[in-house]
Amino acid sequence: MNENKHKLNIVIVGGGASGVATAIFAKRKNPNNEVIILEKNDKICKKVLISGNGRCNLLNKNLDINKYHTEYFNNTKEIIENVFKKFDNKKILNFFENLGILFKEEKDGKFYPITDSANSIVNVLLYELEKLNIKVFFNMTVKDIKKDNNIFIIKTNNDIFSTDKVVISTGGCAYPQIGTTGDGYIFAERFNHKIIKPFPSVVPLIIDCKYLKKISGIKFSGNAKIIFNNQIIKENRGDILFTDYGISGSAIISISRYATELLNKNIKNKLFVGIDFVPNLDDEKLQKHIINVKNINREKDIKFLLLGLINPKLIDYIFLDRVDLNKKLTDLNIGDIKLIVDVLKNTKYKIIGSKDFHFAQVTAGGINLKEINNNLESKKVNGLFFTGEVLDVDGDCGGFNLVWAFASGAVVGDSL
């Protein structure tokens, strides 16, 4: 291992969205800045490439501070607000449009490149790095970072670099299979930064349900609710998928953070996911429908009634031990009807866990925001900056996390 004798101005650890944005904006601000990126993978932005199922949901027009979470929200939200005041949706779109990317808006305010390909985003970023002469060192794993006489010394698997400023853009723990293994937390702790315990977000949930194996693979459109202490704390409508371990789908993972936060604090009692199998009908309309079907088909059984309401493969299981499916419709009383409505609208499963970081799209938790300033520089160590997911900032599902990555990187780059 040979020490790099050429001292740099800025070294960015991590070539994801936030790291690349930092490098580009730092170089644009001052072309004399000597900027390099140390990336442990063989390509940049690997997480961007798989975002939005490979289509790259870059941002969301409904950008709002309340779409974001942090341990000390009321005390630190101004940091997040400051980032988006400096670099909002309009500036992000303008940045990419100037690189040749056009966008289209889809459901729920999500923006995608018109190519429907994350490769388009990554390729233009690569071109811009080359244009600005920003060198990316691939397959470069950082082992240690120290500060000596106001100079940072960075040891890697291949070289030693010295620099005036370091930006930690290593991401969190989500998708460790692409290299996001929490390295940034280790480096931050060595500089005496506190880490809010990371936990998975935007992730499938594990539930207590004895017939999961029977219904695994069944997918439908419904409404999901996270329920704690008999209070609904978050709900969303969309696809719901039963699996052999629990429950997934867009409706579930988009609200999963509200469950995993409690699980992370070892709060499991009275934590449930509630499922509405027929969200298009409220209780009153559903009850009227059941009565109407009963009056026309009196000699049919309850199972016949349910065939037009939910996936037939679910009928035998979600009503198990609650409703006699062989009972004739003519024998239904108002109590039976209300019970059927309750099962269809308010079935609850106890949440006992979540899938791990291998299945999570986002990391919640991270470097305590109380210990950084509005430019995302450490309050403890001058010249040490953090961007993106390594910080204790995570957004709701739908483009909010990727826009945080780009915006935080741009703000840091512009301050270097």
Image: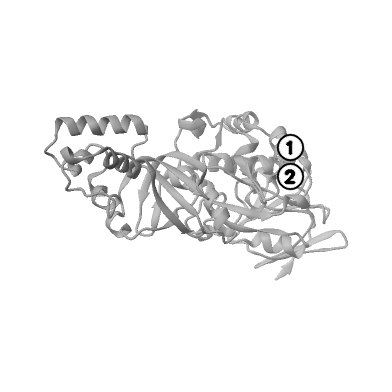
Which amino acid does the dot numbered 1 rest on?
A: Asn
Is any atom of residue 75 visible in this view? yes
Three-letter amino acid code at the position of disc 2: Thr
Residue 5 place in picture, x, y as percent: 79, 62
Q: In this view, does 61 lie to the left or right of 416?
A: left
Q: Residue at x 31, y 33 (%)?
A: 286
Q: Give the residue displayed 32% in from the left and 57% down from the top.
A: 212
Query: Vertically, is 5 above or below 330?
Result: below
Answer with left or right where residue 307 lies relative to residue 46: left
State the separation of the CA atoms marked 1 and 2. 10 Å
> Residue 371, percent across and down?
78, 52
Return the residue nearer the eye: 117 or 196.
196
Q: Where is residue 352 in the image (x, y as percent from the top left)?
A: 46, 60
| Disc number placed over residue 76 in the picture, else none | 2
For the residue carrying disc 1, how many other residues have a C-alpha within 10 Å: few (<14), some (14-19), or many (20+)?
some
Q: Nearer the viewer, residue 129 or 21?
A: 21
